[in-house]
Image (spheres, rainbow, N blue to C red):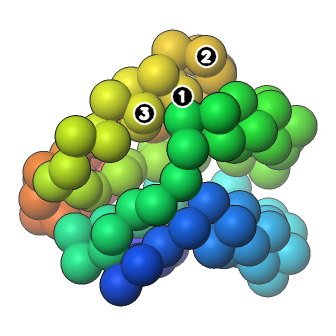
Amino acid sequence: MIIRRFTGESKFEDIMESWNVLLTRYPNLQEFKGILTVFLDAELNHEDRNLNLLVEFLKNSLDQLKDLKIAIVMDTPMVTNTIIVGQQVKSLQIKPFATVEAAMQWINS
C-alpha cells in the first residue's frame, strides 16, 4: 500500500503534483493493493472547477490505476468531492473514509 499525507495548506496544484510524482515513481502500481491519501492535517484550498481537471487526469491514468483501491481520508465537507470523482470515474475503486484505520482495513480486504 502506498500512503500519501498532506499537511498544512494544500492546493489543487499540490494534489496534482503528488499524482504526477506517484505515477512516475511507481510505473507498475498493480504491485500494490491500493493508495491511501490522508488529508486529516491539511487545509484543502481549491475551487470546485478543479474537480473536473482531476477527473480528466484520473480518466487519462486508468491504465496505471485500474484494480487499485484508492482511499481518501478527510474530515472536511470536501469529502463530497471524493464521492463525485468516484461517480464520474466509475472504473476506479475510490472511497472516502473518516479514519486511517478504516481506510487501511478496506484496502487490505
Q: CA distance from mark 2 to mark 1?
A: 5 Å
Dot 1 and dot 3 residues touching (CB under 8 Å): yes
Is residue 26 at least partly visible in the picture?
no
For marks 2 and 3, the one nearer the N-term is 3
Quarter of the picture holding the N terminus: bottom left
State whether residue 26 is above or below residue 61.
below
Numbered circle sitting on residue 6: none
Q: Report the amino acid beneath label 3.
A: Asn
User: Along the horizontal axis of the image, is 65 left or right of 69?
Assistant: right
Q: Quadrant of residue 53?
A: top right
Q: Give the residue drawn at x 22%, y 40%.
A: 77
Residue type of the residue flagged with mark 2: Gln
Could you tell whether 45 is left or right of 108 in the image? Answer: right
Provide the secondary structure element on which disc 3 rests.
helix
Asked whether the beta carbons under mark 2 and mark 1 sit within 8 Å of each other, the answer is yes
In the image, which disc is placed on residue 81?
Answer: 3
Residue 80: x, y in percent?
A: 32, 29
Q: Secondary structure at mark 2?
A: helix
Q: Return the residue at label 2.
A: 88
Q: Is residue 52 above or below residue 65?
A: above
Indicate the amino acid at tag 1: Val
At a point 41% along the width and 36% down the height, the residue shown is 82
The numbered mark at residue 85 is 1
Q: Nearer the observer, disc 1 or disc 3?
A: 3
Is there CB contact under 8 Å for labels 2 and 3?
A: no
